[in-house]
Amino acid sequence: MKVCIVGASGKLGRYMVQHALDRSYEVMGVCREESVSKLDVFKGRISLVPGATDDPEVIKRAVAGCDGVLVVLVPRGVHGYSTGTAQAVLDHARPGARLVFSCGWHISRDGQDVYSWRLKALVKIGGPLARLARFADLNDQVEACRRIFASDTRWTVVRGSDLEEGESQGLPVWSRHVGDPILESNLTRRVDFALFMVEALTNDELIHEAPAIVGRQSPSALAQAASG
């Protein structure tokens, strides 16, 4: 399998690169030119297309011939970076390619998610502050996912909980809706978020799903498993 990883130089992206290489996939990475050095550890084992991930020409070159595309949707700045990235992938990935996108729990596909006061406060207060500082725009990620949900591509949108570093605990568990008791712990190892992304490439049950994930060894996941 040939896969393109959009956002390969970030923490999540580098884990996805390693998981893909562990499966003997051919890897094409996309990252900003100033971040290329972060991928030196993979030199000679992956190909790179340096450039902005919301540049359609960069994405067109990177996804050519790829069977799957893994995309880190980052709401960087206030100029539609996530939306531009998502649209470029939707426009230029080959027909039938598996497209797997990452975002946070605040994204809702059908409005049936039930959010904690903490998350609602973070979005209501932190979102406008981040936009005012011109650091990030959460609405940009919302619009990006709206376009993905409306597309007829073979997409999956993986919605991540809070993340931590550490050794792998295995493939995360998931639910269709935030608010499910299995997700209550709201914590996943970053390496396992990346694992779920890569595994989704070959899991057709996740096509047109927006799974919200949590660590397999988190207390809420263990409690759910114990209850049967």
Image: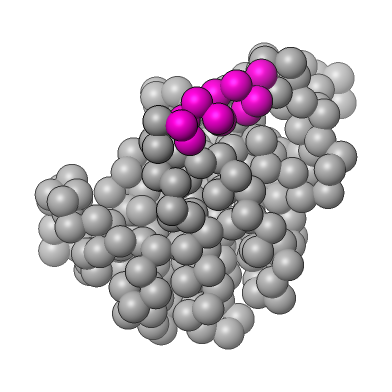
Q: Does residue 144 sit above or below 154 in this rendering?
A: above
Q: Residue at x 54, y 35 (%)?
A: 170
* Colour basis: one colour
Quadrant in the rendering for residue 162: top right
Magenta span covers which residues?
A: 121-132
Q: Is residue 190 visible?
A: no
Report the side of 199 relative to 50 (left or right). Answer: right
Quadrant including the C terminus: top right
Report the side of 180 relative to 66 (left or right). Answer: right
The answer to if 124 sits in the magenta stretch is yes
Q: Main secondary structure of the magenta part?
A: helix
Spot the residue most to the front: 132
Q: Position of residue 169 (x, y in %)?
A: 51, 28
Closer-to-camera residue (29/83): 83
The answer to if 226 sits in the magenta stretch is no
Q: Does residue 78 sit above or below 52 in this rendering?
A: above
Q: Residue at x 53, y 69 (%)?
A: 87
Q: Does residue 81 sit above or below 106 in this rendering?
A: below
Q: Residue at x 31, y 68 (%)?
A: 28
Q: Position of residue 167 (x, y in %)?
A: 40, 26
Q: Position of residue 198 (x, y in %)?
A: 50, 54
Q: How many marks?
A: 0
Report the side of 68 relative to 155 (left or right). Answer: left
Quadrant including the N terminus: bottom left
Quadrant in the rendering for residue 211: top right
Q: Position of residue 65 (x, y in %)?
A: 41, 83
Q: Is residue 170 visible?
A: yes
Q: Residue at x 82, y 29 (%)?
A: 114
